[in-house]
Image (cartoon, rainbow, N blue to C red):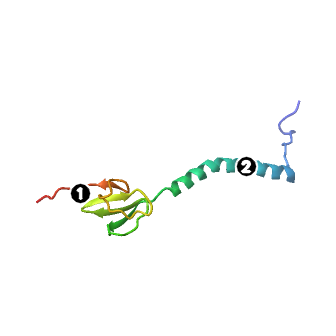
Amino acid sequence: MTTSKTLKPLMLRPDQDFNKDLASVIVTALKAGIAPLKKRLDALEARPQMRYLGVHVEGTTHAEGDCVTRGGSMWISRTNQNRATPGLDGGVSWTLAVKHGRDAR
């Protein structure tokens, strides 16, 4: 009968090739897990950014996502290279975001 005092612990001593193989498996698994997150992040960063640029100035070229005010309302550009006047293009180039309120007087 053996007692716990006579048992020697099992010591694993992986060789260099085992370490390299294990590292390769870990790196491959991490890359596979991160790839969908990176793809989603890239898609989010490619979306237009909203930038408020103040009161609309005739003849100014706006990018998609640019926001301006005109006549007390705020408009968001729907297109790049947008030179149209907000509210006068039939909703093709601009979207009304905030409609002006009534005068309280």
Horizontal arrangement in the rendering, residue 21 relative to residue 52 (left or right): right
Of the 4 image quadrants, the one containing the N terminus is top right
Q: Is residue 98 left or right of 78 when viewed as pictured?
A: left
Task: State the mark number for residue 46.
Answer: none
- Residue of label 2: 28
Q: In the image, what residue type sits under mark 1?
A: His
Q: Is residue 37 above or below residue 59?
A: above
| Quadrant in which the C terminus appears | bottom left
Q: In front of the other: label 1 or label 2?
A: 1
Residue at 76% x, 48% y is 25
Q: Quadrant of residue 50?
A: bottom left
Q: Secondary structure at mark 2?
A: helix
Packing grade of label 2 (10 A; few <14, some 14-19, many >=20) is few
Q: Is residue 92 above or below residue 84?
A: above
Q: Dot 1, crowdedness within 10 Å: few (<14), some or many (≥20)?
A: few
For mark 1, give the secondary structure: loop
The quadrant in which residue 56 appears is bottom left
Residue visible at 33% across and 57% down?
A: 89
**Residue ID at (65%, 47%):** 33
Where's residue 93, x and y in %?
Answer: 38, 57
| Residue at mark 1 | 100
* Residue 68 place in picture, x, y as percent: 33, 63
18 or 71: nearer the viewer: 71
Report x, y in % for residue 101: 20, 56
Q: Nearer the viewer, residue 33 or 79?
A: 79
Q: Residue at x 38, y 65 (%)?
A: 83
